[in-house]
Amino acid sequence: MDLQEVSVVALEIVLARERQKKRLMEESLRTRQIKLQEKLTERSMLRRKYQDMLAKDVAKNKLVDDFMDFIGAIENNENAQNFDEKAMMKSIEAMMNCDGFDNGDSAGSHGEINDARANDQNLGKETMKAAADGTNGDEGSKADDGPH
């Protein structure tokens, strides 16, 4: 083998190594692009989930504020003219049935078992109706009863 052939073989070896490096870098790039796309998809999903949670929180706060305004009007013997009782009851029922606000995840992430939805649904409706009627749920006591 002469010097020129040795140089050609050495250059071919270097070229083969460079091709191998390039191939590995391209594979790494594709893998990282896939991971990046997965992270972007996850971020988008988490962002939508966060926005949904915020919207549900706003809806819950509005429901509570409207209900407290209504209770305040009843306690002051005022006429709650701007209060839509049917809409409020539908919102409350939706929240109690977990069809609306938290999709049944009222136990949170603590692993608690929540049977209250099934067992106390009627109690909740009676309590809400009693509050709307101005009673505390007892048959004999009314909020507007005076001294006897």
Image (spheres, rainbow, N blue to C red):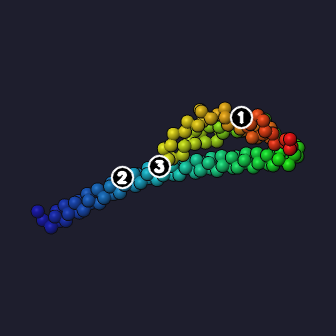
Label placed on residue 38: 3
At x 56% / y 41%, what residue is drawn?
105
Q: Earlier in the sequence, mark 2 or mark 3?
A: 2
- Label tally: 3
Is mark 1 in CB contact (under 8 Å) with mark 2?
Answer: no
In the image, what residue occupies the spot 39% across and 51% down? Answer: 31
Q: Secondary structure at mark 2?
A: helix
Mark earlier in primary sequence (1, 2): 2
Residue toward you, 92 or 14: 92
Frontmost residue, 38 versus 120:
120
Distance of label 3 from label 1 (alpha carbons)? 48 Å
- Image coordinates for residue 48, horizontal then vertical, percent: 59, 48
Q: Nearer the viewer, residue 85 or 2?
A: 85
Mark 1 or 2: the one toward you: 1
* Up-down relation of residue 68 to residue 88 (above or below): below
How crowded pointer 2 is (Cα within 10 Å; few <14, some 14-19, many 20+) is rated as: few
For this orientation, the residue located farthest to the left is: 1
Q: Position of residue 131 (x, y in %)?
A: 76, 40
Q: Is residue 35 left or right of residue 117?
A: left
The residue indicated by pointer 1 is 126
Q: Residue at x 70, y 49 (%)?
A: 61
Q: Residues within 10 Å of mark 3 (few under 14, many from 20)?
A: few
Task: Name the residue that disc number 2 marks.
Answer: 27
Is residue 56 something one can see in this rendering? yes
Asked if residue 132 shows in the view, the reply is no
Give the number of the mark in front: 2 or 3: 3
Residue at 75 percent across and 40 percent down: it is 136
Instruction: Classify residue 140 by image quadrant.
Output: top right
